[in-house]
Amino acid sequence: MNDLAMDAPYRPAALDRAQQGLLGKPIDRYEAREKVSGAAPYAFEQAPENTAYLAVVQSSIGRGRVTGVDATEAEAAPGVIAVIHGDPRMPTGEGNSRAMSAIGKDEVFHYGQGVAIVVAETQEAARAAARLVAVSYEESPGRFDAADVEVQQDHKLGFLPPVNRGDLDAALAAAEVVIDRTYTTPIHFPAALEPHATTAWWEGDKLIVRSSNQVIGAARDTIATALGIDAERVRVLAPYVGGGFGGKTGVGPEVIFAAIAAEKVGRPVKVALSRRQTAYMVHHRSPTTQRLRIGADHEGRISAIGHESVAYQNDDSAFLEPVPFGTLPLYAGEARRFRTDLARIDLPATGAVRAPGEAIGTFAVECAMDELAEALGLDPIELRRRNEPPRDPTTGKRFSTRRLLDCYEEGARRFGWDRREATPGSRREGEWLIGMGMAAALRGNFTVNAEAEVILGDDGRATVRTDMTDIGTGTYTVLAQTVGDMLGLPIEAIDVVIGDSDLPPSAGSGGSFGAGSACAAAALACEDILAELGRRMNAAPEDMRLKDGVVTAGTRTSPLADLVRGSPIAAKGKTSPGKESQATSQASHGAQFAEVAVNAVTGEVRVRRMLGVFDIGRVLNEKTAKNQIVGGMVWGLAYALSEDGVVDTRNGRFVNPDFGEYHVAVNADVPQIEAYFVEEIDDSANPVGAKGVGELGIAGSGAAIVNAIHNATGVRICDMPVTLDKLL
Ligand code: MOS
């Protein structure tokens, strides 16, 4: 195993030679044909013989106790195989565990919790019979209104402890200009298009779970814990995933229900949550309150920055939205205070949804910066330039790579920022007020353990194996590109095998760390293969050139296949964080620009165009990277203008848990979007030098729109989303 901790900057020499010239190129998706032809099976499309279907009966109270379950009528309904409740094998521990415990215990922790399951011959029969299960309850009072509960400052939740540097209050009192604003953001549902679906079956004493999941190694462990069996007895498969958005980072109760049902009825069992059920059985993003205080002198030099927030969580989960995470390294300023306080509620768990922290935190700080620029009479980009710190202003660590100033400059040029009118409300086209806004984008870069195996086969083809997932992000493709460049093989000569928890453990898809980590592990495995090829060629690896499956060393040339015939080479690579990861402050960056039109009569907002320039380290594949950035910018648009989950505070029920009432952006909402990269390979991030890209596009994009709305109208909205009623 080529096991490399990031103790120092590192780049494989063979990667620099880019022997096949694949990395960075906008190569089409490896699995494109399977996906567009419908040949790629998703979790619910698995069809083991004799499959039964599962439906979940949900609690109709928000807090209390189940006093009785009468399944008589459901059991007599056509096609019903079993009604299950009172199964004690339900998990304790992280995540949705208490919700999962619901069919095992009497307690109801939140509205919509699973309290029983029905297994039937068809999905229709299961769902119809679920309505016939009569559950009686004893209700008790619950905390359903986050605004009504006491806020805890001392808590251990989340990974981001409070930061207090200098005397914020004194620095604010001494500042010449102070912005003090409180912003609110609502509930966000992850809203992946592919339903949360699972097909589960037992092969002897081994459980096979074909599930729509982002991080399958962790999923295997969670499922094993829930069922009280060894992890070796669980295998999670997820070769194709139709979007994750954070909601598929964990294991939902329906997965455990399917495993238990499959055992009980002795058949494979399938479940797909309905859209409305997803709101209750999958975590959501906590609504937040964020107070931003920024103090500066008359030249715009920031002396004080405070980003203090409140997020909520239920009694059971350890996650807490790291609201100010993106603000920590963003701007200079001596006095600094960052914190997230906790409100406890009796609602489904909150969790990671589309850039936890930065998505909503950068919205608040970037709106506050826009207001500060206006108060100072400074261009918003100039204000940011004046506060670009040479080192991480919170930790004092050096930046690995940071091209934020270049992003501003190139973005301003491409967007035509010089055409912006500084005075709000001064550009009008008929009924429409036109405005431009910008914001910085930042998303922390994480170095994460990842392993991959590469096998150079008999026939000269290479196979890369790791338990990564491709959630629409391009994992298959960038893995093939990495191996191709390392071993000098065309992309057609590479097989990518992912989406199986029996494969070497990767980081999974989450936190924007998947591609960089997985490709780094694959590159390290290839280094060992090159060393072995060198022995067989009797040449030093650095003297070999490999291209199109042919090895050249000095005057000697050999087809790769000849070197491995009868003796394939298998090697493993592993990357992990090390001293360099600790010593540096790492993030992806960008500059976001938006132009909006606001109807002066109706208050309707139309985003006309969006443009961003981003610093993501090495661009592994220009096409898939752009796809992700543009997707993120669309999320930002939806956060700014429409996404808004609402709780009925009387009973903890969601008012709008479906696409009819919870409005994600649709095609008609999305304008022309352009994304560009300033590339600088980040040798401190991981051995392929790629920083996170998956969730960067959402950071700052909402703020650019809200700032553009202010530029168009002179109105500053601090409560998301900006619906037309707030503008009138
Ligand atoms: Mo992402 S919300 O960290 O999958």
Image: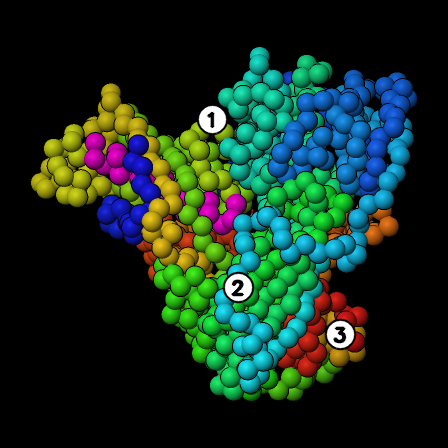
Residue at the image position 30 percent from the left and 32 percent from the top: 1
Q: Is residue 722 left or right of residue 528?
A: right
Describe the element under mark 1 as helix, strand or loop: loop
Residue 15, given in percent of the width and then of the height, sits at 28, 47
Q: Residues within 10 Å of mark 3 (few under 14, many from 20)?
A: many
Mark 2 residue type: Asn
Q: Is residue 357 above or below residue 709?
A: above
Considering the whole magenta stretch, tell me its main secondary structure: helix
The span from disc 3 to disc 2 (Cα, nearest Å) is 36 Å
Residue 585, given in percent of the width and then of the height, sits at 41, 58
Q: Which mark is residue 502?
A: 1
| Residue 631 quadrant | bottom right
Q: Quadrant of the C terminus?
A: bottom right
Specify whether residue 30 is painted magenta. Answer: no
Tell me where the magenta segment starts and ends, as one range: 510-532
Residue at the image position 74 percent from the left and 48 percent from the top: 345
The span from disc 1 to disc 3 (Cα, nearest Å) is 53 Å
Is residue 295 in sight in this rendering? Answer: yes
